[in-house]
Amino acid sequence: MELHAFVLHLTRASSRRANAHHLRDVCKATDGFATVEVWPAVDGSALSSGDLSDVVGANLFQPSYPFPLNNGEIGCFLSHRQIWAEMQMREAGAALIIEDDAGIDANHFIPAMELAAQNIERLGYIQLQTRHTASPAALIDSNGPCRLSVPQVSGLRTTAQVVSKEAAAHLLHMSEMIDRPVDTFVQSHWHTGLRPAMVLPSGIADVAGDLDGSTIQNSGRPFFEKLARSIHRTRYRRSVSTLSRRSAAPAKGGLRNA
């Protein structure tokens, strides 16, 4: 299957530009990609109130997301939606979407990508994960040290993932309105019908802290606000775990009723 690669980069994040270009160059040097390009991310801080009201809803599905979306999270979600839409205009059957705060270890990235490319048509969405999950997982395939599995509770983060054209079209349709960050939406396979797979080790690391920190999260909150958020997050994760166990999405990946 022919693959494209999109390096998602926020233009004003100048401290990440060199890393975005490095990611582009590494992907260009990796066999299997028909094209590789740096894709300009949507700047959430530049969106008008009208733009925001057109795309952001509330309590669109269960469990209700307990936090308001910030502009960075909205911009990130819209950036992924743009690429999902762009994929429908391309001939390639799948794409790697990698964010500009990713680090790459080619020793693991190359076999991880080979594994993803061999299975993406069937599975639809494969995360090149940066961390392990404690959730039970069904082992699907392996390539050297890299293991492809489908966890019951899908991992968060969109640092890097391989997405099929069919899955991108499905997720695009399911996200015409949004009420939570893109990784949390993708995690919600009881709603989307698509249970993401993951590869570990993937050769991908989150190096935002080594660049300039996250362009999404806002630290420095007061103590009691942090405490309240922690309580809400714990309750939300419990609901996610329950709904993941009951999900009708295929336990070994792929689209429901596909």
Image (cartoon, rainbow, N blue to C red):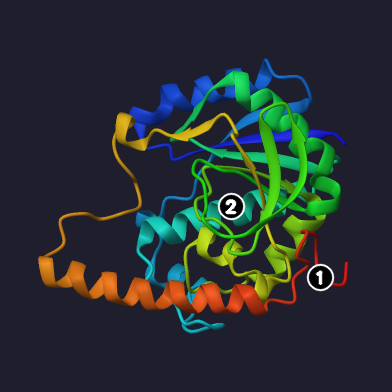
Q: Quadrant of residue 117?
A: top right
Residue depth check, mark 2 versus mark 1: number of the one nearer the observer: 1
Point out residue 154 in the picture as x, y percentages from the top left corner. Answer: 59, 60
Identified at 31% across, 36% down, the residue is 209
Q: Is residue 123 above or below residue 191?
A: above
| In the image, residue 240 above or below residue 161 | below
Please name the amino acid that badge 1 sits on: Arg
Q: Residue at x 66, y 79 (%)?
A: 246
In the rendered image, the quadrant that contains the C terminus is bottom right
In this image, 81 relative to 180: left or right?
A: right
SS at mark 2 in the image: helix
Query: Viewed as shown, does residue 71 lie left or right of 142?
Result: left
**Crowdedness near tag 1: few (<14), some (14–19) or many (≥20) residues, C-alpha within 10 Å:** some
Q: Position of residue 37 (x, y in %)?
A: 63, 30
Total tally of numbered discs in the picture: 2
Which mark is on residue 80?
A: 2
* Residue denoted by label 1: 256
> Residue 126's mark?
none
Residue 5 image point, x, y percent: 68, 33
> Which image quarter: residue 14?
top left
